[in-house]
Amino acid sequence: MATFPFEISAREGKARTGRLKTPRGDIRTPAFMPVGTAGTVKALYMDQVQGAGADIILGNTYHLMLRPGAERVQRLGGLHKFSGWSGPMLTDSGGFQVWSLAQLRKMDADGVTFQSHIDGSTHRLTPARSIEIQADLLGADISMQLDECTNFPCTHEEAERSLALSLKWGERSLDAFGARDAQTLFGIIQGSNFPDLRERSAKGVTAQGFGGIALGGLAVGEGHDQMCATIDMTMPHLPDHMPRYVMGVGKPIDLVESVARGIDMFDCVLPTRSGRHGQAWTWDGPLNLNNAKFAEDTSPLDPVINCPASQVYSRAYLHHLFKAGEYLGPMLLSWHNTAFFQALMAEMRAAIAEGRFEALRATLSAGWENTKSKPKAES
Amino acid sequence: MATFPFEISAREGKARTGRLKTPRGDIRTPAFMPVGTAGTVKALYMDQVQGAGADIILGNTYHLMLRPGAERVQRLGGLHKFSGWSGPMLTDSGGFQVWSLAQLRKMDADGVTFQSHIDGSTHRLTPARSIEIQADLLGADISMQLDECTNFPCTHEEAERSLALSLKWGERSLDAFGARDAQTLFGIIQGSNFPDLRERSAKGVTAQGFGGIALGGLAVGEGHDQMCATIDMTMPHLPDHMPRYVMGVGKPIDLVESVARGIDMFDCVLPTRSGRHGQAWTWDGPLNLNNAKFAEDTSPLDPVINCPASQVYSRAYLHHLFKAGEYLGPMLLSWHNTAFFQALMAEMRAAIAEGRFEALRATLSAGWENTKSKPKAES
């Protein structure tokens, strides 16, 4: 298995900036990966994603294995060729979507059997099959181990049993991955919000020898503060030299606070999902373009961000597009949000390099205080 | 009223090619105008529309007067600035959509009162109000007179009464338009499929002194052959030097057969509407990308048309996007279809200039024979 060189060029506190060097190009870190669920970053052209500043995108194994099918993607030349994205690509293992989307899922010690939410057909994911799909059939540059995703909240006993399984599956994933000189595999830390379990998981995954380490089980309803606390309890047990990836995170304030804690990589559907629903993320917080107050607002979303969707179109026009249900509304806001998230990452990278990250963090986190996710009510 | 210079540079049979010169740029004829219903050509960026080769687009008065409102568009700087299209723009009068979309419409000798299909609010269009909306508030380069749209089929008596009203409204439209040195107004010929009425309407509209002449009442269910027959019965009564515009037409075969009869301008929602539903128009006829036979077809839609949507993406990928319900499917097919329609117009212009239009027509019309619209069943 290749371990991509990870060069940290500057630090401020726990935050760090650098490059993860892959055969398909460098990933500037901290990096935000737009999500290309089903071989397309929703409502965007790939050159817009690249032009916005993204070095890497994420593809969803669960979606692609069901439609168009992983073997079909391989016959069509792999996911890069199929989707038109030529830069680095990370795929998830499929596990998380099996837990959140599939019907009649059934776990056993070797994997999970489930029915497609699309047509009810039966499928099975094991650690080895997930690797086969990701690395062989889709052709991911970075694959993720299959792990079990516990509900949040869960008991210590449940979390402990689950993380033991995930560690075992990590080992099987590494075995299945074998020797590949241009692809790498990341392990995933679980343990819910229990410090002893996060520590055990972090140490276990680190010892297994992956090319990078992800924190799983976040952004699942725990809220912003618990997310930060979980990162805090995990970080002391991670090696400095490996890239650290928080899966499924998050809002801009989550990104800032995670970078401050030493996280290097993120992915989230928020920029495009928000964009489809009329929400624009800005330095001043989120704006709901459906709101009538924008009906005659001739200002653009952001005159500085180097993206036509941010600079050229008036808020009045965007408001009109959403009221009229026009495709161009989601197209423009998904583009703007993608560009804004990339601009935020670029600004954090520059701030770390210039020793002004803590000042930036203080300003942004204060301004975005009211966007912090609350914990989901316990059921 | 300005009369835009119309320079015919080549002819073959009744077909002709040239330029209609407007203050915002030349319109190469024969010209196909993409439809920007509500201030956006659906699912396209304006630079894609321009890059596809369109010199002019059409805006719908009915849609814009209801949402966001014509006065609001004016306050926001006019339709060019609002929508981001800087080239020539033609607006329709709103009449056709009042007939096809509005609720509880009520005609009188001076105009039509109707309820919005969006919110039921009451509105009124008169010849003068339509001109005010188009020329003053939206800022159209080419406005269309308000006319009455009869049903198809209709009786000779209905068509005769209706065309008399449309002629009167044409006169009122010209009066309301007055002296404008950078904008022009087109009249509209009606008369259903009655030769004597089309002749009377053509002569009447010609005598009124518009800047261009449109054939209305087509593409309303009469079918391809009756459309051609109606154009044939009308053309002998039109002056050679004025641009001739068939409203709402059409399929590629309609465009070819209309150009052969001396038509200079067209508009139709077909490229984008088809594109949203998975239909791609090609030199070989329409393809339904929803069809399973494209699931592993790695060829592009058209390797020659200078448009990424035509050249770069595989049919397999397009098929996948439609099966998955992804935004990018309608985006790409609307783009391809718009580029294909513009490529067809460019090819017809070149063929006329090079004296090979009849050969082109013979090839295309034979290949597209089975795409001819049949007459709508009479009720």
Image (spheres, coloured by chain):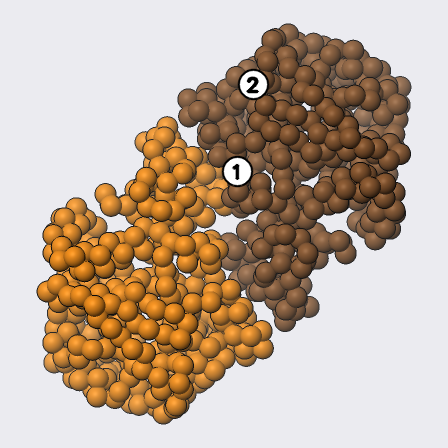
Chain colours: A brown, B orange
Instruction: Kindly identify the residue that appears in the image at 37 percent across and 63 percent down.
Output: B55
The percent position of residue B74, horizontal first and vertical second, equals 54, 77
Mark yes or no: residue A85 visible.
Answer: yes
Residue B95 in view of the camera? no
* Image x and y of residue B122, in percent: 50, 79
Co-location on one chain, circles 1 and 2: yes
**Residue at 41% across, 58% down:** B50
Query: Which element is circle 2 on?
Result: helix
In depth, the one of A123 and B139 nearer the eye is B139
Of the image marks 1 and 2, the number of the one nearer the N terminus: 1
| Residue position for label 2 | A135
Give the x, y percent position of residue A115.
55, 24
Q: Are marks 1 and 2 in contact (CB under 8 Å)?
A: no
Of A335 and B8, nearer the camera is: B8
Residue at the image point whose x is 12% and y is 69% from the top = B232
Instruction: State how far apart marks 1 and 2 are (Cα).
Output: 19 Å
Q: Horizontal placement of A264 versus A95: left or right? A: right
Vertical comparison of B76 with A339: above or below: below
Q: Residue at x 15, y 66 (%)?
A: B11
Q: Is residue A213 above or below residue B179?
A: above
The quadrant where residue B124 appears: bottom left
Indicate which disc residue B313 carries.
none
The amino acid sitting under disc 2 is Ala
Q: Which residue is mark 1?
A: A40
- Quarter holding the C terminus of chain A is top right
Q: Is residue A175 above or below residue B69?
A: above
In the rendered structure, the residue with mark 1 lies on which chain? Answer: A
Left-right relation of A305 to B22: right
Looking at the picture, how far across and down is residue A373, in whole percent?
80, 44
What amino acid does circle 1 point to? Thr
